[in-house]
Amino acid sequence: MADKWYQNWFNSPYYHILYQNRNNQEAQYFIDNLAQHLQLAPGARVLDIACGRGRHSIYLNKKGYDVTGIDLSYSSIAHAQQFENEHLHFYRHDMRKLLHINYFEAAFNLFTSFGYFDTDKDHIDALVSFRKSLKAEGLLILDYFNTHKILKDLVPSESKTLSGIDFNIKKEIADGKIIKSISFKHEGEEHFYQEKVAAFRFADFEKLFSASGFKISRCFGDYSLAPYHADTSDRLILICTKAHV
């Protein structure tokens, strides 16, 4: 079976070249605001789902939490593991499968690290595993792009030069997904990758959460935790609790 786009792209060294300028200060600002808002107990166990190379996990750990980071990418987890300590661990793991049960006080899924799968069932399976991993009063924090604004402001094509590589990027909407096609030439060889992320809106998340046993308790629109407005907010940040039926 052929690898999915996210297995190929996230394991590629070119992924990290294209996104090398990610703003770590912005990420830390977001975590600071979340920590102040959530008021998790010192030493709380938190799960960082699709943690990549661990930038959020490492900072959460520095803030005093016991952090477990999971990601499907071999290369990202290998990189992250060099930062492990007694209260920070990284594992290669598929988010659709359960890692621990009734274990974490909070689960974080940040920076649009969701919406990658082909079917709603896969997305619901992932959310169910998130829910089962949480303690009874545990929280899920899911940070997604604001699809409304993305579609309104979509730039069909752009070029970026990073580390001497000219990346040509095209964006389109197809099959309910926002598709980013990335092509470039390096050392005489042509390369092509895609990102295919579901164009989920607030109502879509309501349905997915309902089907997986979550309810939305709070919603924010940016990393300062300002209110969410569909037309203007940069992010869709959802704080969810386990639905007790």
Image: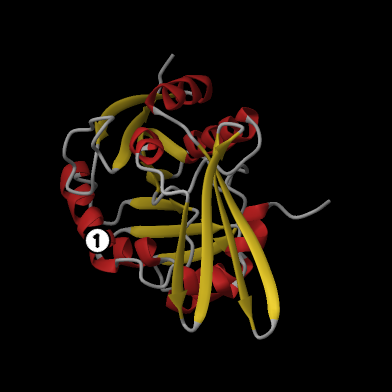
Amino acid type of the residue tagged 1 in the rendering: Glu
Residue 218: horizontal and vertical position, in percent?
25, 29
Number of on-image labels: 1
Residue 108: horizontal and vertical position, in percent?
39, 47
Residue 107: horizontal and vertical position, in percent?
40, 45
Return the residue nearer the eye: 117 or 67.
117
Residue 60: horizontal and vertical position, in percent?
30, 60
Report helix, strand or loop for mark 1: helix
> How is the protein colored in the picture?
secondary structure
Q: Residue at x 63, y 35 (%)?
A: 122
Say which residue label 1 marks.
Answer: 26
Q: Residue at x 64, y 29 (%)?
A: 121
Q: Residue at x 60, y 65 (%)?
A: 183
- Quadrant of the image occupied by residue 148: top left
Q: Is residue 64 visible?
A: no
Q: Residue at x 31, y 39 (%)?
A: 237
Position of 65 with respect to 118 (left or right) is left
Return the residue nearer the eye: 157 or 97.
157
For label 1, count other residues whose C-alpha is less than 10 Å away and answer few (under 14), some (14-19) or many (20+).
few
Q: Residue furthest right?
A: 1
User: The C terminus appears in which quarter of the rendering?
Assistant: top left
Position of 237 with respect to 171 (left or right) is left
Q: With respect to residue 40, does 206 lie above or below?
A: above
- Quadrant of the image occupied by residue 39: top left
Position of 173 with respect to 139 (left or right) is right
Q: Is residue 157 visible?
A: yes
